[in-house]
């Protein structure tokens, strides 16, 4: 078996998918058996190292360029981590689908994406021998919205990276000083896209009589100003901090130092921030939507993402009870140990073998 893994999405333009590809590349070589090979197809920048595909995942040229490279390197299995892909690769193909937000929440994506996504995903359906889904919820969505047979889908959960672990007090203090954070804070990490549900989180935060500041960290998309507008409207500027993007090196200490991690998202294919926070020992309140209960298990406190009163009550209850927070911290650490990239790689390799 000779697997070609398409790593053109291992760029900042694809943060979640890029993390997935990066970690597969890190661990897959350790789980392949004797006689099994891995070739990495890289983008025009030449990283990671491997045969270069000049066309982007959206370029028409990839339809023949990838096929030519696969043939040249004698690949017997092609793995695309993205639905926009070559649809005639010439070898058995595995495709990872992380979520189908444009079909589940069409009003929250651009019209162009709303039109193209179902078309391209159906092309992938006709190409792939097998699909990998990050969660059972994504698998079920593929079956419900696209009629894909469940036996063509294998659920392979993701995991926190090794550096997500409880930081020591010195690290926490240093990051708090560098980011100018107060001694106590509640944390959200993620984008401000509509499905992340930040406006309702801010509405709930306005109802919580807390000593902490709500810290919102992550890439800010200027197309969605509603969260900042909500802060101004409710006069929460003294109680909310927008950090913007945070370096990967600072994230573990940021998670470790928080009194509570909140994640009210309406839809997640997996939900990296929840498992990262848990791996750092943070108590977690998150929505019970989509895949999040699969990630948080019994360790998280769940809320209806549309129920602002319930969200405020859950946040307030955890913040007011030190013993409960300590209990949730231990539960988070235990839950995080159930996920590992080694297991993700082993299950992925097993899918390769089933088609190759």
Image (spheres, rainbow, N blue to C red):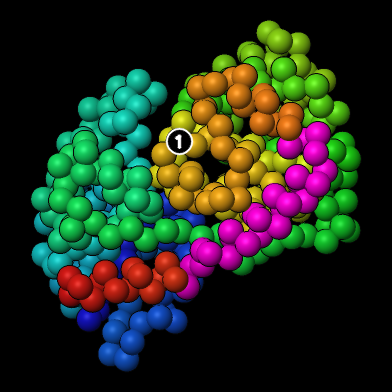
* Relative to 169, 120 lies left or right: left
Residue 169 makes an appearance in the image: yes
Residue that badge 1 annotates: 289
Q: Position of residue 25 (x, y in %)?
A: 43, 69
Residue 49 makes an appearance in the image: no
* Relative to 154, 267 lies left or right: right
Q: Is residue 101 above or below residue 74?
A: above
* Relative to 26, 81 lies left or right: left
Q: Position of residue 257 (x, y in %)?
A: 79, 48
Q: Quadrant of the N terminus?
A: bottom left
Q: Is residue 37 above or below residue 256?
A: below
Looking at the rendering, the stretch of residues picked out in magenta corresponds to 318-342
Between residue 316 and residue 118, name the one nearer to us.
Answer: 316
> Can residue 30 be found in the magenta stretch?
no
Q: Position of residue 169 (x, y in %)?
A: 87, 57
Picture quadrant of residue 313: top right
Q: Main secondary structure of the magenta part?
A: helix
Numbered disc 1: secondary structure: loop
Q: Residues within 10 Å of mark 1 (few under 14, many from 20)?
A: some
- Residue sitting at x 23%, y 66%: 78
* Relative to 202, 78 lies left or right: left
- Residue sitting at x 15%, y 51%: 149
């Amino acid at each position: 078996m000779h697997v070609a893994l398409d790593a053109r999405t291992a760029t900042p333009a694809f943060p979640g998918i890029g993390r997935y590809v990066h970690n597969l590349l890190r661990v897959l070589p350790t789980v392949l058996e004797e006689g099994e090979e891995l070739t990495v197809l890289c983008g025009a920048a030449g990283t990671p190292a491997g045969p270069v595909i000049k066309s982007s995942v959206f370029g028409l040229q990839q339809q023949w360029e990838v096929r030519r490279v696969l043939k040249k390197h004698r690949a017997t299995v092609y793995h695309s981590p993205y639905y926009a892909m070559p649809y005639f690769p010439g070898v058995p193909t595995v495709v990872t689908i992380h979520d189908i937000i444009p079909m589940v929440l069409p009003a929250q994506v651009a019209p162009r994406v709303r039109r193209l996504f179902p078309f391209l995903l159906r092309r992938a359906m006709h190409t792939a021998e097998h699909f990998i889904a990050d969660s059972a919820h994504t698998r079920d969505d593929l079956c419900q919205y696209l009629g894909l047979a469940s036996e063509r889908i294998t659920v392979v959960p993701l995991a926190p990276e090794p550096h997500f672990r409880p930081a020591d007090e010195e690290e926490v203090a240093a990051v708090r000083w560098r980011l100018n954070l107060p001694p106590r804070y509640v944390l959200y990490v993620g984008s401000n896209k509509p499905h992340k549900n930040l406006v309702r989180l801010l509405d709930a935060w306005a109802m919580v009589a807390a000593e902490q500041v709500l810290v919102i960290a992550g890439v800010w998309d200027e197309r969605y100003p509603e969260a900042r507008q909500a802060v101004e409207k409710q006069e929460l500027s003294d109680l909310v901090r927008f950090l913007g993007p945070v370096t990967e090196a600072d994230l573990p200490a940021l998670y470790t130092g928080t009194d509570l991690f909140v994640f009210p998202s309406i839809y997640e294919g997996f939900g990296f921030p929840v498992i990262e926070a848990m791996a750092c020992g943070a108590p977690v309140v998150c929505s019970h939507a989509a895949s999040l209960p699969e990630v948080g298990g019994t360790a998280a406190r769940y809320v209806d993402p549309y129920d602002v009163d319930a969200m405020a009550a859950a946040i307030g209850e955890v913040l007011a009870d030190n013993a409960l927070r300590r209990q949730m911290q231990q539960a988070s650490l235990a839950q995080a140990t159930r996920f590992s990239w080694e297991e993700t790689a082993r299950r992925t390799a097993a899918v390769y073998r089933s088609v190759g």
